[in-house]
Image (cartoon, rainbow, N blue to C red):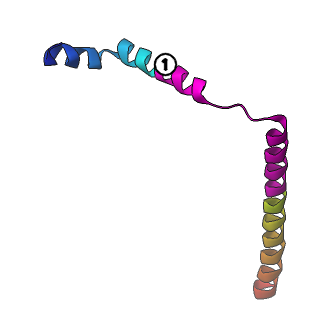
């Protein structure tokens, strides 16, 4: 293949999209599906993390509210 031909093919959007789709399919085949135990563990970890963040934000909200009332009250 000459340099000109390869340059034309690399600019062809259909070939680029086709190559991208093939690469996505190849990478998807390499993935490993988690077990039910792993799903449960990660779900619980995410739930606990979200609860902790909610507690942190709520505490900061109430704390800053009290601080603002003390300063400007």
Q: Main secondary structure of the magenta part?
A: helix
Q: Is residue 57 above or below residue 29?
A: below
Q: Residues within 10 Å of mark 1 (few under 14, many from 20)?
A: few
For the record, the magenta segment spans 23-50
User: Mark 1 sits on what residue?
Assistant: 21
Locate residue 19, reporting x and y percent: 41, 18
In the visual, does 34 lie left or right of 7?
A: right
Which residue is located at x 84 percent, y 57 percent? Answer: 51
Whether residue 23 is situated above or below residue 50 in the rendered picture = above
Residue at image position (79%, 82%) is 67
The picture places residue 3, in percent across and down from the top left corner, at 15, 19
Up/down of 45 relative to 57, above or below: above
The part of the image, by quadrant, that contains residue 37 is top right
SS for callout 1:
helix
In what quadrant of the picture does the N terminus appear? top left
Give the quarter of the figure containing the C terminus: bottom right
Identify which residue is drawn at 21% across, 17% down. 6
Q: Position of residue 16 (x, y in %)?
A: 37, 19
Q: Is 73 above or below relative to 27?
A: below
Q: Is 24 contained in the magenta span? A: yes
Q: Is residue 1 left or right of residue 11?
A: left
The spot of residue 5 in percent (x, y) is 18, 13
Out of 69 and 34, give the one closest to the viewer.
Answer: 34
Residue drawn at (78%, 65%) of the image: 57
């Amino acid at each position: 293949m000459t340099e000109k031909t390869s340059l034309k093919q690399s600019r062809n959007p259909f070939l680029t999209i086709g190559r991208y789709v093939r690469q996505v399919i190849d990478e998807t085949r390499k993935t490993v599906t988690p077990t039910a135990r792993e799903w449960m563990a990660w779900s619980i970890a995410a739930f606990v993390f979200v609860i902790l963040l909610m507690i942190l934000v709520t505490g900061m909200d109430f704390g800053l509210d009290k601080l603002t009332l003390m300063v400007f009250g």
